[in-house]
Amino acid sequence: MQRSSTDGVTVLWQTAPAPGPLTAVLSFGTGVRDETAPTLGVTRLVEALAMTRVGNRPHEFGSTVGEEMTHFIATGTPDDITGFLHAVCSALGDLPLHDTAHTTRLLGIHAPLTCDHRGSAPLDARYGPHGLGLLAHQGPDTYARLRPDTARTHAATHFTRGNAVLTLDGPPPAGLTLPLPDGPRPHRPAPRPRAGTAGTWQQRQIDTVSLLLTSHAHEPAADAAAHVLGRRVEQNTHHTRGITDEPTHHRFLRDRLTLDRVLALHPAEGHAEEAAEILWNEALDLARRGPTPDELAAFTAHARDLHDCHHSHWTTLHRAFTAEHFGIPHHDARTLLAQHTAVTAQDVTHYLRRTLPDAVLVVPLDAAPRPATLHGTPLPSSTCWRFHTQHSPTPGTRFRPNPLRRATTPRHERAEYVLTSWGLVARDAQDEHPLRFDEIALMRHDGAGRIVLAGCGCTQHVHPDQVARGERLIAALDAAVPPHLVHTGP
């Protein structure tokens, strides 16, 4: 891989051109994890606005937004590539912000799945609605909150020449220009895990079962473990029992040294608990006894196909610009294949024994599995609800249900609120959920009520009609939440 620079943008290219047309990928080190709850979707908005300036072209082109990166891709003649890249860079420096309302409306109608939501549940459990945890909170309604100034600020910060890398599968074409706005590569802090979530299982309002395991950014033993575990779970839950679909694997870059790996599966109705126990127990068995020789051979064959497939030039490009953006050591296909082939059963067990104490297993609300740790003790359940039998009730000003609700709602279903100096507590007959003011990620107006996205990722709907003197609760929320976290639109 050769390295040069054009207009201050790093350019990586292969010395020997790939057969056929030239492929170019202009990537920016920004994605969903660089957004906040109020600005969720802004990277997709910037990308969509820029593409409206590109127009129709006689060659293959497109763009994608992912968790960590945004790509503008084209395949064609050298002149096609030069024209496309110039158009994209010019548009990013002068976004058609007058089209924001029209574009956000279209994004809401045809909201693309820029990231795979199946892998997002344990990220939300681990990080809450911040960084990688935001993937679980994408939806068509997110675009309606975005304004032209939000897109302008995001583009000026993240779509700059210092945060761009151009990668080509052949030499750069003559006359190439990349007129991007000036600006450095922004600092990207690693998302901060929520306290008490490592080494736990958790219920969420989802319809998938998923397991999050961490690894080093480059760790062949982790690749082998993920492959073998996925094959075991697929055989056990999908082929043999027929209780889930085929599991899917997802990799998320937490920081330049660490990956969050998620294995997710969709269980048939009533089988989430069984699927979760199979997934967890297979991981435990693999950590204790390791893969069989046949399983390692199957992984080696998979690695060989991966590195020798006809898309290998695209895989090479992807590794190159990922390494450039995030400082990950770059390895060519031959080196990677040699490292994957050298993985042993002991390497796999060593990796899993190291990572399982940090794992997060996430299941639907109606599932209550009984997972155990490597030492045989029950795996703790992490929940943001506190049971009355385990904690004393939170002191504060109580707001009981209004008389109509008390008369029409059974006692065990009645909910009330407790207002404290630090936040609001939702309480029912069995447990309570604290809502700290300083951890609120977003608050939306819903008529007289408020919809609050808490720091744990849960959504609380607070309406003044639910309790007596409810207007005081709304006033307390309005006074506590900073304006930039409040959305008052439709």
Image (spheres, rainbow, N blue to C red):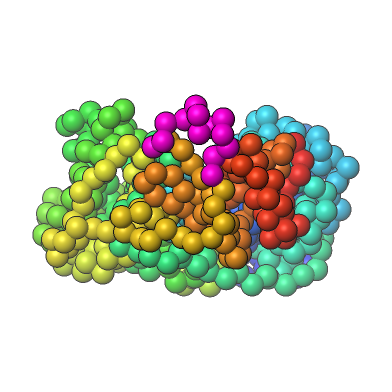
Q: Please name the residue shown 50% across and 67% down the image.
A: 192
Hey, which quadrant is residue 36 in on the image? bottom right
Choose between 364 and 454: the one closer to the eye.
Answer: 454
Q: Position of residue 400 (x, y in %)?
A: 54, 44
Q: Please name the residue shown 71% across and 52% down the image.
A: 475
Horizontal side of residue 99 vs 332, given as left or right: right
Q: Is residue 404 magenta?
A: yes
Choose between 379 and 281: the one closer to the eye.
Answer: 379
Is residue 206 in view from this perspective? yes
Quadrant for the N terminus, please. Answer: bottom right
Q: Position of residue 209 (x, y in %)?
A: 34, 42
Query: What segment carries the magenta color?
Result: 400-412
Choose between 38 and 187: the one closer to the eye.
Answer: 38
Q: In the rendered view, tell whether residue 426 sits above or below residue 189.
A: above
Horizontal side of residue 162 vs 216, given as left or right: right
Is residue 137 in view from this perspective? no
Horizontal side of residue 156 vs 2, given as left or right: right
Q: Position of residue 392 (x, y in %)?
A: 38, 61
Q: Position of residue 308 (x, y in %)?
A: 37, 51
Horizontal side of residue 103 vs 360, given as left or right: right
Q: In the rendered view, tell whether residue 225 sits above or below residue 121.
A: below
Q: In the rendered view, tell whether residue 45 sits above or below residue 374.
A: above
Majority secondary structure in the magenta region: helix
